[in-house]
Image: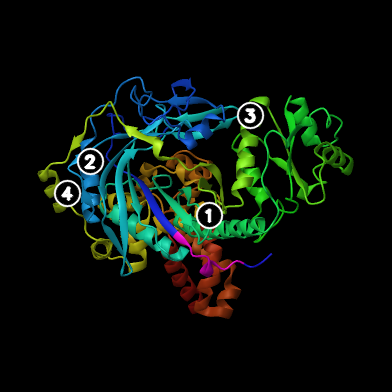
């Protein structure tokens, strides 16, 4: 196993950004984009792959069809209507979304088409009730400046966002329609030969340009980065979907570069071997009855579920499933991930056995049936009869492709910074014209209006924010890049609370609580605003705001009032506070005697343990110093 170096693999990365637009309505109806946990209606569908106008099936659609999923949809009339349910034709295109995409395209000097042709993009994983996503190519070309480098723009599209995945329950996949149909701008950049840190900078620059319009949605899930990654001599380009955070983007690109270069090394070893291929007619064996007495709990559970167990013989393949050119990169792992997307737990291969309760006698039975020679390998899979042949076909294709290098496929980003197989890459037959919507004209007046409304650059916006609210550069950048910028503006407009303190709470305190595992989604914007309003009128202290937020984010309280009660937050009047401070100084007069005025430090800690959330730290400090001086004068 060798050590991986990203500098020598010929890494090339193309970035695609998908950003929700804050237009207050969906793309083809008047429903608002409100997320809810309450659903008043549900219905189910089965989506099927159909041939394109050229008479071809899209490979990604065929793959999804093979999973045999039933799709259950949940909806709320506040956020979806008959359009999302595919029971009514789409309404007129949202004018605000159109205007905003024209502004974004103009900002990037992208060439806008005079006629826009809505298209249907085949998607049958259930994320669209129609079986397709409506998308419109608005412009091509253009560039964005990143640290002096000009990064080219390939295309800018306006499309519908997909439904929100709630989860999989066996053969049923569940979605809510809250998000389906929200306007989404897709910006695809030219592939560039850069390191992962530079890709992060490019994504940050593009995200900042979008935020400068002040008409895009903020928060996790509102912006998603997809990356197309390839390495030298790898063969295929891999699309990684679902990267939601910039730090994750850097890790994903690094992992995918390592994975792909590892697959190149596996391919090189296979090319120098005697491996020829696998015959579906000769090399597949049903061993269900032969393994009926296998003591492995996994095997016995499969038999109890009426699964079929099959073994695949692979001649001259010994050691290849377990060969690991880099840590964590193995062909066996790739195939294990592949079958999981059929709802199959995994596979056993000869390089990892005996294991999992499978002993040498069980292995001998397989070797005898398959007539395994010293240099041969085998793989065992257990699955329902409806899925096993689909899965075996995919396994064989993947093993054969291993000799070529990196297969072109779509993968999913994980929170750990790795990627897992999602589906094959879609083909050209995926797109076809939308028949329910006529072509959309772009007038010269609309183009002129877009040019006039090009937003200020990020640097200009940041400087304006800094001067307007007297913030330091670091805090200005943090609040501008955060999902709370609009809320920050609202709070400082409605209250006289120091903007620096407001920005610090929104950027630092909430983030700290999130890192401690608390859920910021439980903290509503109106609760945040109300907290600062209570602070302004003196009903709570600065220190109590974080206590209130912590109580709500920890699900101990649902309202500000409830959080104040649960955290025992009651403001102490100044006369009572004076008495408490006098008692603290009196009880700790030895510290005062020894440390004199420096005693304010340790006594501050004692006082704040008792008074946190009930009195401001500034006032406590002031009263402590006053009473320490008074005590020193009397000694």
Upstream in the sequence, badge 4 or badge 3? 3
Upstream in the sequence, badge 2 or badge 4? 2
State yes or no: discs 4 and 3 in contact (Cβ < 8 Å). no
Q: CA distance from mark 1 to mark 2?
A: 38 Å
Residue 573 magenta-highlighted: no
Q: Position of residue 169 (x, y in %)?
A: 59, 29
Judged from the image, the secondary structure of the residue bearing numbered disc 2 is helix
Q: Tell whether 45 sits left or right of 339.
A: left
Callout 2 crowding tier (Cα within 10 Å): few <14, some 14–19, many ≥20: some
Q: Position of residue 528 (x, y in %)?
A: 38, 47
Q: What mark, if any, has residue 515 been given in the picture?
A: 1
Q: Which residues are magenta?
A: 4-12
Residue to which mark 2 is pinned: 98
Q: Tell whether 452 sits left or right of 460.
A: left
Q: Position of residue 515 (x, y in %)?
A: 53, 54
Residue to which mark 3 is pinned: 387
Upstream in the sequence, badge 4 or badge 1? 4
Q: Nearer the viewer, residue 445 or 36?
A: 445
Q: Residue at x 81, y 46 (%)?
A: 355
Callout 3 crowding tier (Cα within 10 Å): few <14, some 14–19, many ≥20: some
Residue 10 magenta-highlighted: yes
Upstream in the sequence, badge 1 or badge 3? 3
Q: CA distance from mark 1 to mark 3?
A: 41 Å
């Amino acid at each position: 196993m060798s050590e991986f170096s990203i500098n020598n693999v010929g890494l090339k990365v193309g970035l695609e950004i998908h950003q929700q637009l804050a237009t207050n309505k969906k793309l083809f109806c008047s429903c608002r984009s409100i997320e809810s946990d309450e659903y008043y209606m549900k219905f189910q569908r089965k989506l099927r792959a159909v041939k394109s106008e050229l008479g071809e099936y899209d490979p990604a659609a065929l793959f999804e069809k093979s999973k045999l999923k039933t799709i259950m949809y949940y909806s709320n009339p506040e956020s979806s209507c008959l359009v999302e349910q595919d029971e009514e034709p789409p309404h007129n295109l949202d004018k605000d979304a159109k205007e905003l995409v024209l502004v974004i395209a103009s900002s990037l000097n992208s060439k806008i088409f005079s006629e826009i042709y809505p298209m249907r993009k085949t998607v049958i994983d259930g994320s669209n009730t129609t079986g397709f996503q409506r998308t419109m190519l608005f412009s091509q070309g253009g560039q964005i400046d990143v640290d002096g480098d000009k990064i080219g723009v390939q295309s800018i599209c306006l499309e519908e966002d997909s439904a929100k995945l709630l989860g999989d329950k066996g053969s049923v996949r569940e979605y809510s329609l809250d998000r389906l149909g929200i306007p989404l701008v897709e910006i695809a950049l030219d592939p560039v030969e850069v390191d992962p840190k530079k890709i992060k900078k490019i994504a940050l620059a593009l995200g900042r340009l979008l935020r400068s319009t002040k008409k895009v949605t903020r928060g996790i899930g509102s912006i998603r980065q997809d990356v197309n990654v390839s390495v030298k001599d790898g063969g295929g380009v891999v699309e990684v979907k679902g990267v939601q955070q910039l730090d994750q983007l850097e890790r994903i690109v690094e992992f995918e570069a390592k994975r792909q270069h590892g697959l190149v090394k596996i391919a090189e070893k296979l090319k120098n071997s005697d491996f020829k291929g696998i015959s579906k007619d000769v090399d597949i064996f049903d061993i269900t009855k032969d393994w009926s007495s296998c003591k492995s709990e996994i095997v016995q559970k499969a038999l109890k579920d009426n699964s079929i167990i099959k073994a695949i013989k692979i001649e001259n393949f010994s050691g290849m499933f377990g060969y690991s050119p880099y840590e964590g990169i193995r062909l066996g792992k790739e195939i294990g991930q592949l079958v999981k997307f059929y709802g199959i737990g995994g596979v056993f291969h000869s390089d990892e056995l005996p294991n999992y309760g499978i002993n040498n006698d069980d292995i001998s039975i397989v070797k005898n049936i398959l007539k395994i020679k010293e240099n041969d390998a085998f793989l065992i899979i257990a699955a329902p009869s409806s899925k096993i042949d689909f899965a075996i076909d995919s396994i064989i294709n993947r093993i054969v492709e291993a000799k070529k290098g990196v297969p072109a496929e779509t993968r999913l980003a994980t929170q750990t910074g790795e990627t897992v197989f999602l589906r094959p890459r879609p083909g050209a037959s995926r797109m076809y014209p939308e028949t329910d919507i006529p072509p959309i004209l772009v007038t010269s007046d609309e183009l002129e209006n877009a040019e006039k409304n090009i937003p200020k650059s990020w640097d200009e916006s940041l400087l304006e924010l800094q001067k307007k609210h007297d913030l330091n550069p670091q805090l200005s950048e943090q609040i501008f890049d955060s999902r709370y910028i609009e809320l920050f503006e609202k709070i400082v407009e409605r209250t006289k609370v120091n903007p620096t303190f407001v920005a610090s709470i929104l950027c630092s305190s909430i983030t700290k609580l999130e890192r401690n595992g608390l859920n910021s989604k439980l903290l509503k914007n109106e609760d945040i605003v109300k907290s600062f309003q209570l602070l302004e009128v003196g009903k709570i202290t600065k220190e109590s705001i974080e206590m209130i937020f912590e109580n709500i984010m920890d699900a101990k309280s649902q309202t500000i009032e409830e959080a104040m009660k649960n955290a025992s937050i009651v403001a102490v009047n100044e006369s009572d506070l004076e008495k408490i401070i006098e008692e603290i100084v009196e009880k700790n007069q030895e510290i005062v005697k020894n440390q004199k005025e420096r005693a304010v430090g340790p006594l501050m800690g004692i006082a704040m343990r008792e008074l946190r959330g009930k009195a401001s730290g500034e006032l406590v400090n002031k009263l402590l110093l006053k009473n320490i001086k008074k005590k020193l004068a009397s000694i």
